[in-house]
Amino acid sequence: MPPKNEPEIVDSSKSNAEGGVAAVDRAFAILGAFEPDRASLPLAEIARRTGLYKSTILRLMSSLERAGFIRRLADGQYGVGHEPLRLAQIYQSSFRLRDAIYPVLETLTEESGETSSFYVIENDIRVVLFRVEPKRAVRFSIHEGDRFPLHAGASGKILRAFGPPADRALAEVREHFWATSFGERDPETASISAPVFGVGHEFKGALTLSGPSERFNKEQMQAARSMLLKRAAQATNLLGGSDRELLAALELNEEK
């Protein structure tokens, strides 16, 4: 007999196919319930966040645990397993960007003393693909793999301006090759971002500097723009793209 309040699955080829897809969707919903600030969750909280019955979750948990996506903790709660980390590493390497971008981020952070990041678009959100923190005491609780909406932040403007399809409302960003943000996502944070291109002017992502507003103010922005545009041109060159427009934007910025 099926658990109470859950429909019995009819044994037919059509319902089996649909059930398989539904099971995958439910498994992804379970994984999506975990967040950086809630690394472990009890069964009841997973049920609340996913809207799934506890019996359904328990059936799927056994498969997820065997595959390494979920682990059962000593206190009876659940946490993310080791397998997503392996897939995340494959995801990062699949872009073939780390060798070119990461050294640029390290240089940019060393030069500026601020946090540098590289964002890409994934399904209408912006994803922190790479990130380098400074040695300063004040840092931000953002990590590689974190996701944010596109509508806020300097990197969001760059991704919308240069990513397909280009946002026509950001024509000025496309003209200047940089964008700024003062407290749009976090009221205490400011950021500046520039595009990086590959072969054939293919847009690769947004190179970004961010820091606390009190030390990353408008007066410091011009110097930050020069550093950022210079490193965006360097990254573009390393990826086989043309850095001509970025260098022109750098020259214009330094003339101001």
Image (spheres, helix red, strand yellow):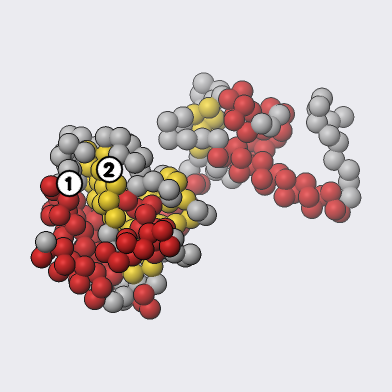
Q: Residue drawn 36% across and 40% down? A: 185
Point out the tag, 1 or 2, that comes first from the N-terminus: 2
x then y, percent, for residue 94? 44, 63
> Which SS class for mark 2?
strand
* Whether residue 210 can be seen here: yes
The residue positioned 30% from the left and 39% from the top of the image is 183
Residue 176 position, x and y percent, is: 26, 64
Q: Nearer the viewer, residue 171 or 149?
A: 171
Q: What is the tally of numbered marks visible in this picture? A: 2
Residue 198 x, y percent position in the rendering:
35, 72
Image height of 38 relative to 128, above or below: above
Crowding near the residue tagged with mark 2, few <14, some 14–19, many ≥20 C-alpha atoms within 10 Å: many
Q: Mark 1 points at which residue?
A: 218
Q: Horizontal placement of 80 versus 202: left or right? A: right
Q: Residue 190 carries which label?
A: none
- Left or right of 148: which side holds 247? left
Q: Which type of secondary structure does the marked residue at label 1 adopt?
A: helix
Task: Quarter of the image for the C terminus: give it.
Answer: bottom left
What residue type is disc 2 on? Answer: Phe
Q: Which is more toward the observer, 81 or 39?
A: 39
| Residue position marked by numbered label 2 in the rendering | 182
